[in-house]
Amino acid sequence: MFFSVGVESPKDADTAYGIAVPAFDQFDYGCVSAADEQIDIPVMAREAILSIIEEMMLNGAHSVKDITDAGYMVYAANPDYTHCDSWFMIDVDLSGFEGKQQRVNITLPDVLIKRIDGFIQDKRAVYKDRSHFLAQAARHELANK
């Protein structure tokens, strides 16, 4: 899932970059972090997002399906986020919060399997493996039902 991330640049050498992820405000969870170096901002943002989602799941009040992101343009216009002087989107894999993995036995034509594997080979940044691809395809179809 893509999340909008607001960044507040440090005012001096002794201050870290501030990081805010507003998508969790709707659940009364403040998702914030900091990074000493600019290169660490995405890592710290992803860690903060995963920590908040883990906390939400442990509390049992919300599911991954409840989470939505309005987009950085909406958040940038919000007076609560005027301190953020730049915005970016980060893709965070939330499939680990959907439940325990289960092995299933399915039958597909070998030509289809070869097409899937060829497609995945060119998109390793998007799909980890064949199972991940099939799970994403199933989520897509189920979301459009």
Image (cartoon, rainbow, N blue to C red):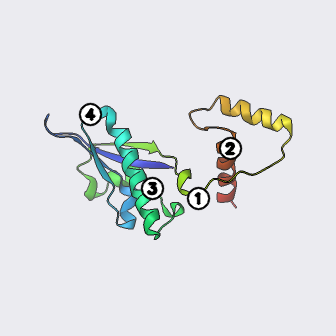
**Amino acid marked by disc 1:** Gly
Q: Which is more foreground, mark 3 or mark 2?
A: 2
Residue ID for mark 3: 69
Checking the image for residue 99, the label placed there is: 1
Res. 37 mark: 4
Residue type at the position of mark 3: Asp
Q: Residue 4 or 94: which is nearer the viewer?
A: 94
Outermost bottom residue: 61
Residue 110 horizontal/vertical position (percent)? 85, 36
The type of residue carrying mark 4 is: Glu
Residue 55 in the image, given as x and y percentages of width and height: 40, 61
Q: Mark 2 points at which residue?
A: 131
Labels 2 and 1: the sequence-earlier one: 1
Separation of disc 2 and disc 1 at Cα? 15 Å
User: In the structure shown, which secondary structural element does the residue marked by tag 1 occupy?
Assistant: loop
N-terminal label among 4 and 2: 4
Q: How far apart are the alpha carbons under marks 4 and 1?
A: 34 Å
Residue depicted at 84% across the width and 46% down the height: 107
Cα distance, mark 4 to mark 3? 26 Å
Label 2 packing within 10 angstroms: few (<14), some (14-19), many (20+): few
